[in-house]
Every structure is written in C-alpha cells, then in structure tokens.
Image (cartoon, helix red, strand yellow):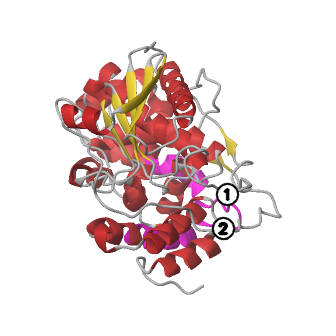
Amino acid sequence: MRGLVTLVSIVGVVVIMIGVFAILPREQRPPANPVAEIATKSAVARETTSPSTGAVQGTTPAGAVVPVSLPQLPAVNKPQLVSPISPLGLVEQYYSETQTFGAVTVAWRPGAFDPAIASSVAEMAQRGIGNVSAFLNIHDDSPLTVFLADEMFDENCRGCQGFAASDLHQIFILQDGSVAADEMQGLITHEVAHVIAGNHIGLPNSLFFAEGFATYQMDADVQAAGYVPAIQAAAWAYQAGILPTLAFLRDEATYEGRVRRRLEYDAAGSFSQFLIEKYGLEAYTELYRTRVPEQVLGVDWQQLEEQWHAYLEPLAGNIVNGVDGASWWNVAQNVAAGFGALYDAPDKVSVESYAALTAARLALYRLDLPNAIRFANESNLAPKTAT
C-alpha cells in the first residue's frame, strides 16, 4: 500500500501482492500459516464472515512453524512505469476489456489476462465491500470498477500496488506478478475501504487517517493468509524503538506504498484500531473528519500517544514463528530499502532482481527471515545482510 487525498479522490496503497491464481504460475502448494494460532480480540465486533483483527495477545506455542521454503522466484514482468491511473478517458481506453458481475466491473488491458480471472476478482471486491460496509454499519451497493494493471503504474503512482479514487468508485490493483495470490483479498479490501470511507465518512485531513483505516480493515485478510498483521508489526516497532510519533504520522509521513513505507502504514493502522476499540466507531469517524481530539475525545494528541503505546505494550514482546520485533524490523527495513531503490529507477532493474526482491518481501511477511535475507541479498537492491 501510498495514498493521496484530494478534493476528488482518496488514493490507497498497500503493500502487497500477485493477483489471482489463474493470472501467472504460482506455487503448487500454499505455504504454512505461521500466524494462524495468534489469538485475537476486538471490543468492536465485526458483523461479517471475516474474523476480527483486534489486538494480538500472547506468544505462539513451543515448536513454531518451520520457515517456509520458496525455491522458485515469482514470475514478474519487467518493472517499468506504464499503466495509467488518470485521466478517466485514458484509463477507460487503456483498460478496455471488461466483465461485469452485479455492481462490480473488472477491467484490464486487452489480452493482458485470461478473462476467467474476472469473476474471482469481482468476488473478492464484493467480499471487501460487504465486510467494510458491515463494519461501518452501512449498506453500499454503488457500482465499483476494479482495474487490473499488468505493469507498474505510471509516474503519478510511483510505487503503488493499489490506488483508489473514491469519487469515481474506482480501484486499481497491480497484477504484474509481484503480488501473491493469497495477498489479493487484503489488497482489494484496503482499496475498497478507501472508496467507502471517502463516500461515507468523509475526506480526511491527512493520509494518516485514510491509510490507517484502510490498513486496519485489511488486517483480518492479512492474518488469515498467514502474513504478520499490522497490529503485531506496530507493536514490534514500539519494542524496537522505531515506532513513528503521531506528529510524524500526521504531518510528515509520505505513505508512498506499503512495500517501502510499511512502518508508516502499520503504525497508522494500529492507531486506528486502538482508537476504535477504546473510544468507539462514532468517535473515531468524527476524529477522522476533524483531527481535533480535544473536541471529540476530551484528550490531546500527547495523551492519545501515551494511550496508544500502552495499548501496544502487551504485544511488543510476542515471539511468533521464532521471530521477535527487533529481528523482524531489522530485515524489514532492508527489504523496504530495496523497494526504494527499485522505484527510484525501475527501468534499470532486471526481472530477476525484481523477482528476488518480491520473494524476499513475501518471506518476510510470512516470518521466514532466513529466506527473506537470502532473497534480499540475491536481489542486489537491498543492503546486504549476513545469513
């Protein structure tokens, strides 16, 4: 997941993913889920079929999951800034092959994908709409268009893996091979959350709330797929002493894609979760619109920061799959630096390097640090780390 808020659109990005199983060759067997047994709770229950993403509690049992082997690199396309996200006329001309399923239309560049994928993408979009709408206690059956990009987005969305234009009811999803099939639902939920929030909560005054809400909404899908959720990553950042301040997150963070700014996204997501669980959804949505906590909550930002840290404290010492916060973020920051190098000059990066960096990210998110380090080193984009 970066995001961009204007008077006409909310842009959301995440970090993450290769689309549907049918798009490109995938692993033959899904990897083990190292976070499947993490206990969760939430004071604000979701009336959906997806589990709540509340606070992670405790540690995994002894005999943690063996790190997943990733013997084959993902099949990615040549990294280059090509696929447009605006203006509307150009977008419709570029993604001109379409299929519609109820309120959801799926569009792509002619010949880029097997049309059989469209129904799966539409189903995931419908699931995301249903879950986010249920969370907000609303009903949203507005038409939505999902644009699938087979190459990186253009300069207007450098580093994006997803993008949302809430006023146009559009989301864009990168499907160039750098997104795993089991990440797809989370990415779509994140972008759908931007669209719904923009139309039912309001345009936020900064990316902090926009990305925070969308990251929180995707966390259930992220954890269900076996990836470390935002709440745990944020707690680990707090333990490691690298958690950004609220002032930085509100006023300085760039949210330029979750693959290279995960620290910002996960911190914002965990703060949104904290606010909703402590103060309730109605208070949260009002603060989302106003950014004046003294008026809405009766406390200031410093007090909220102290409460947020206390909320994260019980999770900070968790060891999951044999991984703790300091070791995870040490590797995560190297992988993020690799993606920074990639997006600074994608035309200079080989397909092999892009694939290796993608494999490193997927291993990292699955708490498989040995393979994350191995593939990051092989990419020649991330700083070298001893194995």
Placement of 67 over or under 366, stated as above or below: below
- Residue at position x 48%, y 57% from top? 178
Name the residue type under label 1.
Glu
Question: Which residue lies most toward the right here?
Answer: 63
Residue 313 colored in magenta in the image: yes
Placement of 134 over or under 314, stated as above or below: above
Task: Please state if 256 lies on the left or on the right of 323 as rendered.
Answer: left
**Along the line of sight, the residue nearer the viewer: 353 or 273:** 353
Question: Which residue lies most toward the bottom here?
Answer: 386
* Rendering quarter of residue 195: top left
> The residue tagged with tag 2: helix, strand or loop?
loop
- Residue at position x 71%, y 63% from top? 321
Q: How many neighbours does mark 2 have within 10 angstroms: few (below 14), some (14-19), or many (20 or more)?
A: some
Task: Please state if 92 lies on the left or on the right of 190 as rendered.
Answer: left
Residue topped by disc 2: 70
Give the magenta-colored segment's residue range.
308-337
What is the total number of numbered labels drawn onto the structure image? 2
- Residue at position x 38%, y 48% from top? 305
Q: Position of residue 13 (x, y in %)?
A: 37, 46
Residue 375 colored in magenta in the image: no
